[in-house]
Amino acid sequence: MKNNNTNIEFNIFPLGDAALTAEFGDEISEALNDRVQMLYLQLKEQKVPGIRDIVPTYRSVTVLFDPAVIRYSRMEQLVRKTAEHMTVGTGGEHFVYEIPVCYGGTFGPDLSYVAEHAGITEEEVIRLHTAPDYRIYMLGFLPGFPYLGGLNDHIRTPRLETPRLKIPAGSVGIAGGQTGIYPMESPGGWQLIGRTPVKVYDPNRKQPVLYRAGDRLKFIPVTPAEFDRITALTQEGAFTCHVEPYRS
């Protein structure tokens, strides 16, 4: 099916009898993800009885629903109609969050490998990694784990051959053409280049995840002393990331 307003094709298919997916294209791109975010937000705003959850990804939206409340045929009709009538610029307001990161050393044990793999210095890796505003394409794997697009191709680095069993919360890593933040201690196979003292996920906050899909992250390099200072402020609940509205 082609969306007349955005000229973007999409397909809808069932996932069992209690879920369906609307898929936009077969690539990772901002244009497709814009449609994903628009559909996600517009379905959420409708507050349809029977919808249990709505999950946006890089290029698709999955809707989980109670078939005893709303039948599959009705759910498909609703999603299709919403997708067909979306217009550009209705994806909601988004923000840029500045995330302080201490690179290298014990904070980023794989920084030297990433530099060696790219044939550049560690300082150049840091410069390239902190240059973009990274779009959050989706959240997943762990609560608050942001899958970020926009990594410079020069520092693309494969995952570890053997994943680590324990990665500290706040670790910033690279895996292929992606970069992201581990919001809590967990296993993982990404190349670790730094760590942030910011709690990007805190179940005790009113908004547990600091950001949402569609927002942007800007990494700001800090020294170990600044890392410790921000950590202390964070523990006291006295640190807030600098945030600005995103203007495309």
Image (spheres, helix red, strand yellow):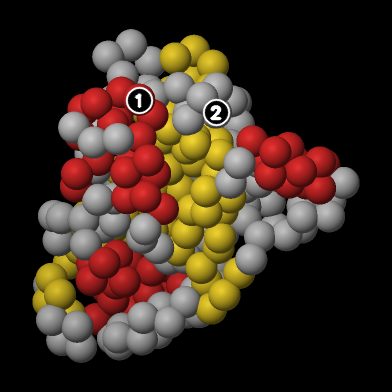
- Residue 141: x, y in percent? 45, 36
Query: What residue does disc 1 label?
Result: 112
Quadrant of residue 84 within the rendered picture = bottom left
Q: Is residue 44 above or below residue 81?
A: above
Residue 133 in the figure: left or right of residue 106? left
Q: Could you tell me how many numbered marks the image carries?
A: 2
- Residue 136: x, y in percent? 41, 57
Q: Is residue 214 above or below residue 237?
A: below
- Residue 219: x, y in percent? 49, 53
Q: Is residue 14 above or below residue 197?
A: below
**Neighbour tally class for label 1: few under 14, some 14-19, many 20 plus, Cα within 10 Å:** some
Secondary structure at numbered mark 2: loop
Residue pictured at 19% horizontal, 44% vertical: 154
Looking at the rendered image, the quarter that the C terminus falls into is bottom left
- Residue kind at label 1, given as amino acid type: Ser
- Rounded to the nearest angstrom, the CA distance separating label 2 from label 1 is 12 Å
Quadrant of residue 29 within the rendered picture = bottom left
Label number found at residue 107: 2
Q: Is residue 28 visible?
A: yes
Whichever of labels 2 and 1 marks the residue nearer the N terminus, that label is: 2
